[in-house]
Amino acid sequence: MKPCAFQLYTPSTLEDALEALWELTEEGRSVKVLAGGQSLIPVLNMRLATPDVLIDLNELDSDLNFISPDTNHIKIGALTRHYQLETSPLISKNVPIITEAERLIGHVAIRSRGTLGGSLAHADPSAELPLVASLLNARMTLQSKHATRTIPAAEFFLAYLMTSMEPTEILTEITIPTLPGRSGQSIQEFALRHGDFAIAVAGAQVTMDEDGCISDARLTLGGVGGTPLDMSASLAPLVGSRPLPEDIERLMKEICQDLEPDGDIHADSAYRKDLAITLSTRALVDGLQKVKDS
Amino acid sequence: MRRQEDPTLLRGTATFVADLTVPRMVEAVVVRSMYAHARIDAIDTMATSSLSGVVAVITAADLPEGVGPIPMRLSSSPELVQALQHPLARDRVRYVGEPIAVIVAQSRYLAEDAASTLRVDYSPLPAMASVDTAMASAPLFEGLTANHVYHRHHQKGLGSEAVAAAPRRLKMHFSIQRHTGMPLETRGLLAVPEAERLTVYGPTKVVFFNRRLLSDLLKVPLEHIHYVEVAVGGGFGIRGEFYPEDYLIPFLAQRLQTPVRWIEDRMEHFQAANHSREQHHEVEVGFDDMGHVMGLADHIWVDTGAYIRTHGVTVPELTQAMLPGPYDWAALDTELHVVLTNKTPTGTYRGPGRFEGTFVRERLMDSIAATLHLDPLVVRQRNLLQATQLPYSNGLKALGHEVELDSGNYPAALLRASNLMESETISQRKSEALHTGHLRGLGFAFVVEKSGLGPYEDARLVLQDDGTVACFTGLADLGQGTGTMLATVVSKELGVDRDRIHVIYGDTDRVAEGFGTFASRGTVVGGSAAYLASAELKRRIVAVLSDVIGNGAKMVMHPSGIKVSGRTRTVSYREVLHRAETQKVPLDVTQRFTATAMTYPYGVHACEVDVSPETGAVHIVRYGVVYDVGKAINLDMVRDQIMGGVAQGIGGAVLEQLVYDETGQLQTGTFMDYLIPGMCEVPDIEVVVTEDAPAPSNPMGVKGAGEGGAVGVAPALANAIADAISAPPEAFTTLPIRPQDILRWIRLGLEHRPRGDEAE
Ligand SMILES: Cc1cc2nc3c(=O)[nH]c(=O)nc-3n(C[C@H](O)[C@H](O)[C@H](O)COP(=O)(O)OP(=O)(O)OC[C@H]3O[C@@H](n4cnc5c(N)ncnc54)[C@H](O)[C@@H]3O)c2cc1C
């Protein structure tokens, strides 16, 4: 379990990193960028990936590690560590679901190294942050030496462990809308052990109007498909109503009917589907409760 | 009580084999089969050998003529000899992970690079990844007529006729999944040649046996092999046995005349170290309306993997021998079937055979209770052997000894566990839990263990002139606290501070012989030897000082010298030793304790759980163990042993599994998929250690404590879960029990339960 030989490049500016990534890729060398290493290093050690060059982003804190609020949204640098998000008052105030999500990710050691950008770029379908990014339709800023583009989460996650990033691009910044007024967010997951990747996970955001009826509801499911699944369009029946938990559960049974999650040794397809119903009900009910409580 | 071993371990200053480096050391990587079953047509080592940094590449063809398979250490049986494993596969591989070649290079990195260039031409053969496939396939070895390599039938009383004649019967099928010990530290060896001697660092558990075996295989005199134990990150039965690498690494060091180190990596460990536990039981039990058991019939099918390793058929024989447990069976009819398959070979893992058998028996007791709508505690009480029935022989043999349950008060243990868990008021707690949306359940499991396997152990005590005592033992320490245990025994008997007893072990140049640390034997056999040696040393000191001590006076061994009651002068140790020398009474004492029988600790596991009716998730609310060890030398260490065992038992009950696909590929070969319990999965464990039933067969009355913590968890948890969801008798017979299984039984129950039943 030792990695193949690779060259390590540790740039000290984002510009240098982008330059190197461009040049090396052009030369036909296989390149990987290294963030927290919590997913990449095991992959290298097991020789599942054998890049020629690693570009280490860890010296780029001044460019890529930040949490800066703006009107209606918050911008987060890709190199921001899980623990920074977990403990940031700005985050818990403006995007509380991220605080909740972070507590579900691995253990302290993993959260002190792993990064937001790494989690999104790795694109594990049962990971919490890709789910949150999809739920809130976060926008990803991708930079290469020659261009910068910003795309919504829906266009970023393509398939299991696959994104629409080009080999010459680095994910630099994530823009996430802040919690609207009279809204509540919730993330609910089920894992076999504390800190494991979830077997299934649901994220929800509900907004109420002044009369206490739902004016907007969003729901994303993880662990039941190759990417986080956006179920928001199916929540139309809830809009304009004051649903009871039973009503929500009934609707969830209906909308999860057609899911066809893959089973594996830890959970078969039927169980994942069952969990999707339970967890999405819990997430919506909890989201509603938070609006009522505030 | 503080353990002598802990300061270095906790400060991170202990030396493990991977911490050792010596000049000129090279590193080895074992190349392993990618196929579960294949012919090896050719191995081309040319390209690999010529890579820079590569020191040597060896295959079976490079081993000395006639080197031979690795023999059995325990439970040897002639029919099994055909299926022993050679250090390297010659022309056929039989499991994924089987060693084919060893590459030695200047670094582990280079060796791994080189390994990926080795060309092995395989012709894949059909893989037998289950007992059923193996039973229908041609034998894996020439000289065998079938893959069914071993069979043992045991009948007591009328056997299955008694079952057939019983007024009530239950037929059930149990499956215990393949899983195994996961020491924090994987295996590793460093072999250093010096002139004609070879020093090997890293052996453990059964150091003297392994050394003898290595000397046989290398064909060098025993004195030329020096084994040194270093700190070990856990053994659990699987570590310290003689594996192919235990020959290959010393062989390479000897051949290359340079130090060779091999450190197993975790992915190798999953494929290479012994697996354990995989069994299927086809059980039928007969009983009456009161729940009295009348007979038990069981076909035990064992997937033993591709080769027979050092344990022979120890594990399944222990299952068969210990299956009857604490109950008074008038009739038994058990048949053991051991079958070879294309999976990693198996061996012992903490509580070998009993983890499996205890699950079957104790889940069965609850199933009987559920069938009759009786309290499972009542059914157990009605069947337990009474204290007056002991000693009681169940007519079976385990590890060559007849199973004679030596002493115990089983009903008292059950009662104590019931009180501990407040089972009287469980229904109240059930309704409280219901208010928070949980299903509460309480489950019990009775455990009978064995310990103290012989043949014997020596202890040598030497009084030093500073009043400290050196204690030499042939036991090993794999984290159990062997040193603390022996120091405690000696300290108590001699009245010397524990810190002044220096235990010396783990070096074959300093200790002559020993049978090792396994099967919960250390305290019983090695501890008893230390006890006898202490008594003898004390007797000799008294004799040496007889003119000073006189009749009836007491002596106390102070750090500064020996004080005698009624006198002011202390006798210095220098003087004591001087007197001993002139009187020709050596204060260097060796005593042997020979075990005439095994001794049987016992106890009860109990747990209370909350089950989520929405997800099937289980939360352990309370976990209690009542365990009788006859006499505890060190109460804290007994408790800790039980707790560690329970943690592993939880893994086996609900998480861990080594899953193979039908081509014989291991699906759970990393810690991503093989789930071991972490801090958050292990609850507080309440341990009540009792000393109701001292062992009659050793001077201190001690019984072993190493394994009882692991063996009772699966049935206690299964029974608690079944109680929580009012599952039918046939539920939860397959391990591990996963939330999805629980949810399935909950849903089935809701479909079938007549309305209004809940109010019952
Ligand atoms: C034991 C364990 C448990 C875990 N449990 C969870 C869990 O419950 N939930 C969860 O979500 N995660 C979990 N993780 C993963 C963890 O969250 C990682 O931090 C995350 O998956 C990857 O982040 P990283 O910064 O470590 O990325 P790295 O490992 O450094 O990189 C991962 C991938 O992303 C690429 N990459 C990284 N940064 C960028 C960037 N800025 N631009 C482009 N590409 C980039 C890399 O090239 C690589 O392909 C766990 C990890 C471990 C070891």
Image (cartoon, rainbow, N blue to C red):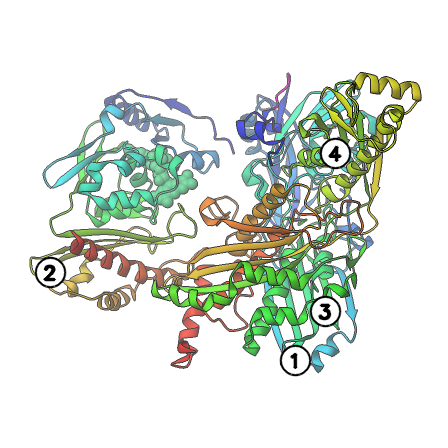
Residue B254 in the magenta stretch? The answer is: no
Q: Position of residue B556 (x, y in %)?
A: 76, 28
Q: Which residues are magenta?
A: B20-24
- The amino acid pointed to by label 4 is Val
In the picture of the structure, the residue carrying the numbered disc 4 is B490
Q: Is residue B135 left or right of residue A256?
A: right
At 70% from the left edge and 53% from the top edge, which residue is drawn?
Answer: B601
Query: Which mark identifies residue A212?
Result: 2
Q: Position of residue B351 (x, y in %)?
A: 65, 51
Residues marked 2 and 4, same chain: no
Q: Quadrant of residue B206?
A: top right
**Mark 1 to mark 3: distance in Å?**
14 Å
**Disc nearer the start of the sequence (1/3):** 1
Q: Residues within 10 Å of mark 4 (few under 14, many from 20)?
A: many
- The amino acid pointed to by label 1 is Asp
Q: Nearer the viewer, mark 4 or mark 3?
A: 4
Looking at the image, do the residues carrying marks 4 and 3 touch, with CB atoms under 8 Å apart? no
In the picture of the structure, the residue carrying the numbered disc 3 is B328
Q: Quadrant of ligand 1?
A: top left
Callout 3: CB less than 8 Å from ligand 1: no
Query: Element at badge 4?
Result: helix
Q: Nearer the viewer, mark 2 or mark 4?
A: 4
Query: Which mark identifies residue B545?
Result: none
**Mark 3 to mark 2: distance in Å?**
67 Å
Query: Element at badge 3?
Result: loop
Q: Is residue B683 left or right of residue B614?
A: right
Q: Chain of mark 4?
A: B
Query: Element at badge 2?
Result: loop
In the picture of the structure, the residue carrying the numbered disc 1 is B288
